[in-house]
Amino acid sequence: MTAALRRLCAFAMAVVAGAVLFVTAPSGAQAAPADPTPAEDGPALLSEVLTATGKRYAQAKAALDKSRNRQLQLSLELRQAEDRLEELAPQIGELAAASYRTGKLTAVSALLNTASRDEFMARATVLTELNMVNDRKVAELTAAREKAARAKAALDAEVAEERKQLAVIARQKSEADKALALVGGTKLTGGFVAATSPVAKAAPRNSDGSWPDESCSINDPTTSGCITPRTLNAYNEARKAGFRRFVGCYRPGGPFEHPKGRACDWSLLNSGFANARTDDQRLYGNNLTAFLVRNAERLGILYVIWYRQIWFPVTGWSTYTGPQDHKDHVHMSMV
């Protein structure tokens, strides 16, 4: 076979291969990013438990915070009602003693002690006004007692709500511990949290403090896929804080949050992914992780994985020995 013929055959085979790929590619498939994120084929159970547990924890934490804030408000109302009761009690005591000694003063009793019609009318008017004041004081005392009782009952209900949410959080912690045991799960005393990490702009919440459900509805700035608005906020806030190296968020496959637009992988390099080889790369990963953990409550972080460790809000730091050791990127999953 001549060289020209061999070149022609190679060209024909390339055309056929391209045609086969074109025909068999699924319709509507997302175009692959220039630097695809690393595969993370961890146990499906781990992904499901962390996601479900993290969401229930976030809901319970929001309800707990709301309950504790309400308790502070109710405690203040109860204290004010009790102070008002203390203020009214001596006045009511004086009225009760006077009534016991003389009986309730009326126009008739005033008439018995007056010498003239004019004196009777004047005294009757004054005594009627005094009795009205006395009645108003009694009404104020009754209202203050009712207000204190309502505040106390509401406060008791909020304390019960707090206990309920704490029980939910304890259950989520137990479930998370079991799930994390699949990938190491040994507890750590430290982590990558730095007090000097910048404070991120908080993502929007519902009026009750919970996180709204969000779909993959925003164009992903790192790929041709999509992400949620909350993920975009976290991405923008991290970049604003100085973390501007390569990032990959959306990925069509895998058991974790990437195909839902709720995860990003933050590389240590300006392009592509490779294990940390320099102090600068390791420090970059440490600082980024610290930023995400410190702002987890504000951004809606579900969990963070970096350098064989995983941070989960309900459990804190644990070792991570899953299929991907995350030495080449920081993984961020969102609620």
Image: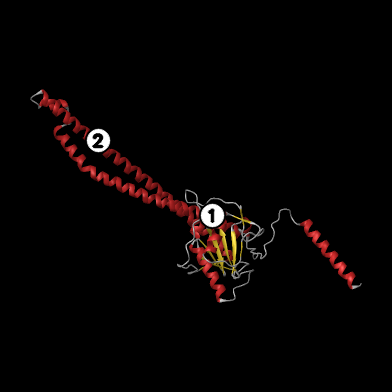
Residue at 17% x, 34% y is 99
Q: How is the image coloured?
A: secondary structure
1 or 2: mark nearer the eye: 2
Residue at 29% x, 41% y is 144
Of all residues, the one furthest to the top in this rendering is 117
Q: Position of residue 201 (x, y in %)?
A: 49, 58
Q: Position of residue 300 (x, y in %)?
A: 52, 57
Tell me the quarter of the image containing the N terminus. bottom right
SS class, disc 1? helix
How far apart are the alpha carbons under marks 1 and 2? 53 Å
- Looking at the image, is 7 positioned above or below residue 82? below
Left/right of residue 189 with respect to residue 102 in the rendered view: right
- Residue highlighted by disc 1: 55
Left/right of residue 299 with respect to residue 328 in the rendered view: left
Question: Closest to the observer: 87 or 28?
Answer: 28
- Residue highlighted by disc 2: 136
N-term mark: 1 or 2: 1
Question: Closest to the observer: 15 or 286?
Answer: 15
